[in-house]
Amino acid sequence: MKLINPPEWKRPRGYANGVAARGTMVFVAGQIGWTGDEIFETDDFAGQARQAFANTLRVLEEAGARPENIARMTWYVTSKREYLNAVREVGSAFRDCFGKHFPAMAVVEVTALMEDRAKIEIETTAVIPD
């Protein structure tokens, strides 16, 4: 996997501008901040993000993938302000779960998610090298 960041661009913080990869693709459905038993243990934004990260890791593990195999993530958040207010804690949770591997990412504010208590949903694509 090769992270793509044009050298003349300012270096991104916490993500890559692009990723080139070859191998078996793993598509992880949107993961939210509830447990595998579909129980929300917190309404805290950073806490839900940490749980969504853990859920993503569990699906990747089941497929034989590791954090460094993640090529892209799309985050859907119900409040830009709540995300920005928790960005330090979310970043810490991200590094705890995924290390210092920063794939291509997008964060999108949406009006709601399908589960009323959900504050964040994350879709992930990973590539296990050949």
Image: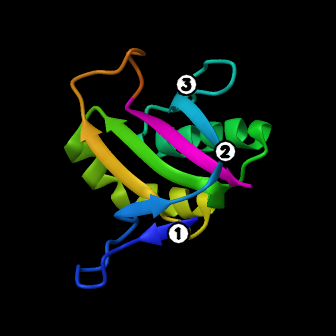
Look at the numbered discs 2 and 3 and tell me whether their residues touch, using CB distance below 8 Å.
no
| Residue position for label 1 | 2
Q: Residue at x 32, y 48 (%)?
A: 106
Reading the chain from its start, which is encountered first: label 2 or label 1? 1
Label 1 neighbour load within 10 Å: few <14, some 14-19, many 20+ = few
Label annotation for residue 104: none
Q: Which residues are magenta?
A: 119-130
Q: Closest to the observer: 129 or 44?
A: 129
Reading the chain from its start, which is encountered first: label 1 or label 3? 1
83 over 100 or under it: above or below = above
| Residue position for label 2 | 57
Q: Residue at x 26, y 40 (%)?
A: 108
Quadrant of residue 90 within the rendered picture? bottom left
- Position in image of residue 93 (x %, y %): 53, 56
Reading the chain from its start, which is encountered first: label 2 or label 3? 3
Q: Residue at x 26, y 53 (%)?
A: 84
5 over 130 or under it: above or below = below
Comparing labels 2 and 3, the label whose residue is closer to the camera? 2
Comparing labels 2 and 1, the label whose residue is closer to the camera? 1
Mark 2–mark 1 Cα distance, whole angstroms, equals 21 Å
28 over 68 or under it: above or below = above
Label 3 neighbour load within 10 Å: few <14, some 14-19, many 20+ = some
Mark 2–mark 3 Cα distance, whole angstroms, equals 18 Å
Residue 126 in the magenta stretch? The answer is yes
| Residue position for label 3 | 40
- Position in image of residue 5 (x %, y %): 35, 73
